[in-house]
Amino acid sequence: MRLSDFGPDFTWGVATAAYQIEGSPDADGKGPSIWDTFTHKRDWRGKTPVQDGTTGDVATDSYRRYPQDVELIKSLGFDAYRFSVAWSRIQPTGSGKVNQAGLDYYRRLVDTCLENGVEPWLTLFHWDLPQGLQDTGGWTNRETAHRFVDYTEIMAEALGDRVEHWMLFNEPLNIVISGHLVGAFAPGKRSFPAYFASLHHVNLATGWGSRALRAALPDADIGTTQYLTPPIGKGPGPLGDLAARSADAILNRAFVEPIIGMGYPWEEAGILKGVKAYMRDGDVEEMTADLDFLGIQYYTRLQAPFLPIPGLWTVPQFGGGAGGAETTSLGWEIMPEGLGMVIDAMHAYGKFPRLVVTEGGASFDDTVVDGRVHDPRRIAYYEDHIAQVAAARLRGIPVDGYFAWSLLDNFEWALGLVPRFGLVYTDYPTQDRIIKDSGYWFAEQLGGTARP
Ligand code: IFM
């Protein structure tokens, strides 16, 4: 299989997110986000919630180095760049007055992409909620969904003339479960009420935001992205099946089904009935989004040591490879066929006109040797996962894009700077970018100019 076999209408892109790459946390009037607050928190032992104690204060310094990054994308042969906007650069407290300097930054970034023949794919929300909104409850407050609509309208008005592809949310699962139930991500909440409320309000914001975008930009290509996993229960026989079904309801269906008009799957996971306390009449219709595509983000399957009692459930784990399967440096099982499974599952709803793989990638312990980074396992990872996309297309499923996570090594949230997901190695002390073999692999196939 060659990447060119996918034909000229298939989009090949790379993805990043604002907090993971930009740095410059208070440049040009930016307000603090919940990730600025979270990464600077200390517990009584002086420990931060980030494993290696780092923050996104500098990250890959892309707020200042974006021209170089866009040139890199072009040299690797990609035709699209998926990035996110830091809401608190646009509205420093999350509501009210617009910060023109913040808007200007994204306008410059978009223009630089267009000048380089790279199509901008803009994600409105990739987890960095303005702290000002967190101070009034964040996603546990229904008002935040209204503020998201205001922000969406501001962005549509500012960049709608030059950005065609829009995504509302990045992986609501991580906002809701990692951020409000497990507490491993900002805002670090650990409560069932926070989980239920944030789940519902993010789903509501997806419906409202999609219609606001459509009204402002009738010709735009509108999507949203979901973290998806083919959960496979650990228990034996029927108990394992029960665990798998409840995991599927909690991890996948609770995020996908509300936005396609199906409401919450509480018949499979009774615990989800907790959402009812936050629902108002008509919300099932309100959550239903007007989408052109669903963005699929797939990395691994989550192991589900779920208690096999409907409604009772423990936190899913990133498991080591089952039966000795290969894992990435984070211990995530490498299971390419899982991508085919989630593509099939999303297609089976019959509700998404198109599917796009908006993220896929792997962290390995890359090192620089004589100026080169040899990462054959990442190349194999991409080959095997992209083969799943090719197979899905042969089954007649309209998957028409693939975005590699990530352009360059960056700040991996609660794991800090240690994990390396990039096609390009970031040497943090110097901020030098070194193209890895996987980057050259894409460049060679996509007609990019980069060569070792
Ligand atoms: O780095 C993240 C990204 O922000 C969202 N999707 C998963 C990636 C790897 O963990």
Image: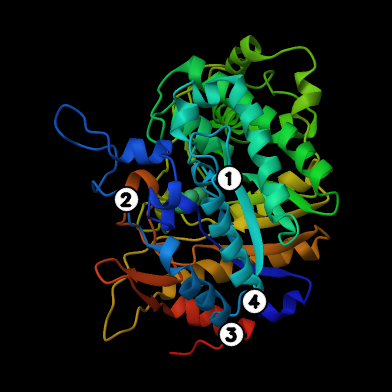
Judging by the rendered image, the residue that carries numbered circle 1 is 170
Label 1 Cα crowd, 10 Å radius (few <14 / some 14-19 / many 20+): many
Q: Earlier in the sequence, mark 4 or mark 1?
A: 4
Judging by the rendered image, the residue that carries numbered circle 4 is 115
Looking at the rendering, in which quadrant would you find the N terminus?
bottom right
Judging by the rendered image, the residue that carries numbered circle 2 is 416
Element at badge 3?
loop
For the image, the number of numbered tags is 4
Left or right: residue 214 versus residue 232 is right
Q: CA distance from mark 3 to mark 2?
A: 30 Å
Q: Earlier in the sequence, mark 4 or mark 2?
A: 4
Q: Can you give x and y, in whole percent of width and height, for residue 328 in the image?
A: 40, 58
Q: CA distance from mark 2 to mark 1?
A: 19 Å
Q: Earlier in the sequence, mark 2 or mark 1?
A: 1
Question: In the rendered structure, which amino acid carries the disc numbered 3?
Answer: Gly
Query: With respect to residue 14, does 256 lie above or below?
Result: above
Q: Give whichever of 151, 272 is nearer the camera.
A: 151
Looking at the rendering, in which quadrant would you find the C terminus?
bottom left
Return the residue found at the far left.
Answer: 45
Q: Can you give x and y, in whole percent of width and height, for residue 23 in the image?
A: 38, 55
From the viewer's perspective, is the residue at label 4 or at label 2 nearer? Answer: 4
Q: Can you give x and y, in whole percent of width and height, for residue 143 in the image?
A: 61, 22
Q: Kindly check if marks 3 and 2 are in contact, taking CB atoms under 8 A apart as contact.
A: no
Q: Earlier in the sequence, mark 1 or mark 3?
A: 1
> Which of the 4 quarters of the picture holds residue 400?
bottom right
Label 2 Cα crowd, 10 Å radius (few <14 / some 14-19 / many 20+): many
Judging by the rendered image, the residue that carries numbered circle 3 is 448
- Whether the residue carrying mark 1 lies under 8 Å from ligand 1 is answered with yes
Question: In the rendered structure, which amino acid carries the disc numbered 4?
Answer: Glu
